[in-house]
Image: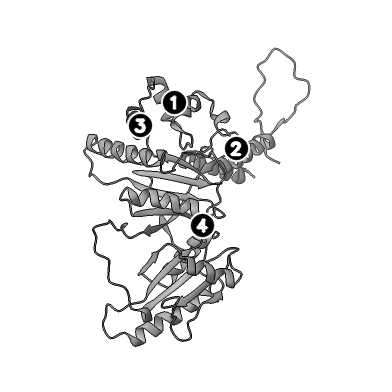
Amino acid sequence: MAELNVAEKGGKGKKVRSKKQNPAVDLTAMVDLAFLLITFFMLTTTLSKPQSMELAMPDKPKIDDPTPPETPAWRTLTIVLGEDDKIAWYGGGLDNPQPNEEPTLTSYGKEGIRQVILRKSQAVKARATKPDETLVILIKPSEKSTYKNLVDILDEMAITQEKKYAIVDITEEDVMMLTEKNAY
Amino acid sequence: MAAMCDIAFLLLTFFIMTSTARLPEPIEITTPASTVQIKLPDVNLATITVGKEKVFFGTVGQPTRMLMLEKMAERYGIEFTEDEKKRFSLIESFGVDIRQLKSLIAMDGADRMKEGVQSGIPMDSLNDQLSDWIQAAREANLEILKENDEKLRDLDIAIKGDANEAYPTIKKVMDVLQKKGKNNFYLVTGLRGEDF
């Protein structure tokens, strides 16, 4: 492969050079080493900074704080994260959900929860009379959900550009609802 | 053929010059993927690594680490020698009870990463060392910023969790942060497209 032809010089040495040779230096080994070193450095070092997403949680309410006003039921969407990557949603409160928005199981991703969020967002926009009447999403992860489930939902918030959402504690009733649907 | 050798050496030089060696982590973490592309800051940062229900903590910058250790030593009444402090400042991320920290510092780098050596920083309500480490890190960071005459800002906190980690552990970490008034933090994720 790689060769280096040593140029011929007029012989000054005492030794007799009987045959004229053109020795060729084989550089294959050096190139092999170079590639080995490249591979080593590629595997053992980091080039890019890790990606991240920002998460902002509301302040923990202190005892003296007044309770914040409740959001009207027609513009809340609750997403409950169950076990085994199962997810359920409902609009309004669990005890009296909005019409056609009873707790339903759905899936993560483009066809599942994203459609739910987009539809609800459009419905709220159609019904809103003031500019600050926007959709509020409550995310309730259960104890059997995984961190990946939470990140997926936060990702959906970023993709659908929903800015008003909160991660809240799950309630007993929500857990019962999940158990009924075999998601807990 | 000579051209290929040239490119090989150029690539090699490029990789040597532009990358920092990746230090071994106490546990293997596969972060979940997201579409959001915010870069993690590389200074003024503390990382809380969560995996297998264990919590590990690490900060960026050797002076910050040494100062943080001094503050924790004061709070818990443990003495560290200058040599131990130096060795500690080279550890990127650790997860042990503070009482076992001395033995961790004394170990070799390879021994530290062995299975079962680091069992995580305790964060139960009676023994909340994680809060103390975070507090010490924030104070150390502010002091270092003051020393360097830089603009004062709070330490950024990133949570690096394993994708399959059960939610309760992550919630505990977020609760610890919220209790200390830290409501904005980063979640370390991989990258993916919107089509999933």
- Same subunit, labels 3 and 2: the answer reads no
Label 4 or label 1, whichever lies nearer to me, is 4
What residue is pinned by disc 2? A37
Is the C-beta separation of discs 3 and 1 under 8 Å? no
Determine the residue positioned at 66% across, 28% down: A8
Q: Chain of mark 4?
A: A
In three-dimensional space, the C-alpha distance between marks 3 and 2, rounded to whole angstroms, equals 42 Å
In three-dimensional space, the C-alpha distance between marks 3 and 4, rounded to whole angstroms, equals 30 Å
Image position, residue B30 (x, y; %): 56, 51
Label 3 or label 1, whichever lies nearer to me, is 3
What residue is pinned by disc 3? B72
- Which secondary structure, mark 3? helix
Q: Chain of mark 1?
A: B
> To which quarter of the image does residue A71 belong?
bottom left
Give the left or right position of residue A10, taking residue B177 as reference.
right
- Same subunit, labels 2 and 4: the answer reads yes
Give the left or right position of residue A102, taking residue A55 as reference.
right
Q: Earlier in the sequence, mark 2 or mark 4?
A: 2
Image quarter of the C terminus of chain A: bottom right
The residue lying furthest to the top in this view is A14
